[in-house]
Image (tube, grey):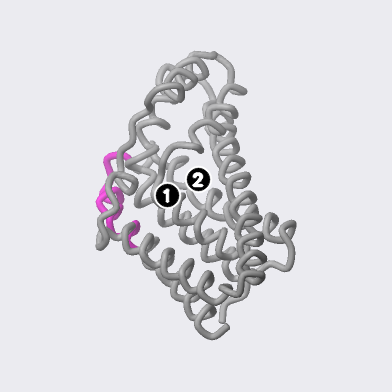
């Protein structure tokens, strides 16, 4: 069976495949817009700060979900429904993974395009207008909260991994680390977006995205089997 250490590599690989399969369509237009009117500047630092903010948001959400998973298993243990909680969470991850592949319809949360609405749009416009690279860090923190199906799936898996932890603090650390691996995996695709534009590699997006769905389904199967054998 997989160890928690191996899960970090699975999350990294999932983030990498999600990045090239999903993020190019969903976050690509945002990244391109952030590069406009900055062609004469060294924008790599700007984008690294943006991705740092985004990954930090994922990490914080993962820490919350990991701790929540740990609390859930404690409550389930006290209530005598621990086995059912383990099985249900594993099955839910499988459903979310299948939704990533398009086999299970879950509305627009797995769409490759996303608009900025309401308060988030206002903050985005204000931050994007600031002519300083340091504005990209809060931009990343903000846009890390964009509704995103693959992120939801990864957070659910992080919460389930937190159930394996012996304490809420350990669950928080596991969730933080898993989402850090997932977030870092999504960075290369967006950094290379400009170089990939106009090449045949973009036509592989759907296939690569399906790979990430397969990885998440395997994570769900792993957790489901552990729940059944618990």
**Vertical relation: 83 (above or below) 51:** below
| Residue 129 in picture, x, y percent from top left | 48, 14
Give residue 196's quadrant in the image. Answer: top left
Q: Residue at x 39, y 37 (%)?
A: 27
| Residue 106 in picture, x, y percent from top left | 29, 53
Label 2 close to label 1 by CB (< 8 Å): yes
For the stretch drawn in magenta, the main secondary structure is helix
| Residue 87 in picture, x, y percent from top left | 48, 74
Give residue 72's quadrant in the image. Answer: bottom right
- For marks 2 and 1, give the CA distance: 7 Å
Q: Residue at x 62, y 55 (%)?
A: 68
**Vertical relation: 74 (above or below) 65:** below
Q: Which residue has dot 1 on it?
A: 19
**Vertical relation: 137 (above or below) 66:** above
Q: Residue at x 66, y 55 (%)?
A: 67
For label 1, count other residues whose C-alpha is less than 10 Å away and answer few (under 14), some (14-19) or many (20+): many
Question: Mark 1: which secondary structure?
Answer: helix
Q: In the image shown, does 143 or 36 lie closer to the viewer?
A: 143
Say whether disc 2 or disc 1 marks the residue closer to the N-terminus. 1
| Residue 126 included in the magenta stretch of the image | no
Q: What range is drawn magenta here?
A: 197-210
Q: Which residue has dot 2 on it?
A: 187
């Amino acid at each position: 069976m997989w160890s928690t250490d191996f899960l970090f590599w699975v999350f990294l690989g999932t983030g990498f495949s999600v990045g090239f399969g999903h993020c190019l369509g969903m976050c690509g237009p945002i990244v391109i817009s952030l590069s406009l009117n900055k062609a004469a500047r060294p924008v790599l630092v700007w984008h690294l700060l943006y991705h740092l903010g985004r990954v930090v948001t994922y990490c914080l959400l993962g820490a919350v979900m990991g701790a929540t998973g740990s609390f859930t298993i404690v409550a389930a243990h006290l209530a005598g429904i621990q086995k059912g909680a383990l099985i249900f969470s594993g099955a839910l991850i499988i459903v979310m993974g299948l939704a990533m592949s398009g086999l299970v319809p879950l509305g627009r949360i797995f769409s490759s395009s996303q608009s900025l609405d309401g308060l988030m749009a206002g903050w985005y416009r204000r931050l994007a207008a600031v002519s300083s690279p340091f504005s990209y860090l809060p931009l990343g923190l903000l846009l890390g909260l964009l509704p995103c199906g693959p992120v939801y799936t990864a957070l659910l898996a992080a919460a389930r991994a937190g159930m394996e932890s012996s304490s809420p603090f350990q669950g928080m650390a596991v969730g933080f680390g898993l989402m850090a691996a997932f977030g870092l995996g999504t960075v290369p695709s967006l950094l290379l977006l400009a170089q990939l534009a106009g090449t045949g590699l973009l036509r592989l997006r759907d296939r690569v995205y399906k790979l990430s769905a397969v990885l998440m389904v395997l994570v769900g199967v792993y957790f489901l089997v552990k729940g059944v054998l618990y």
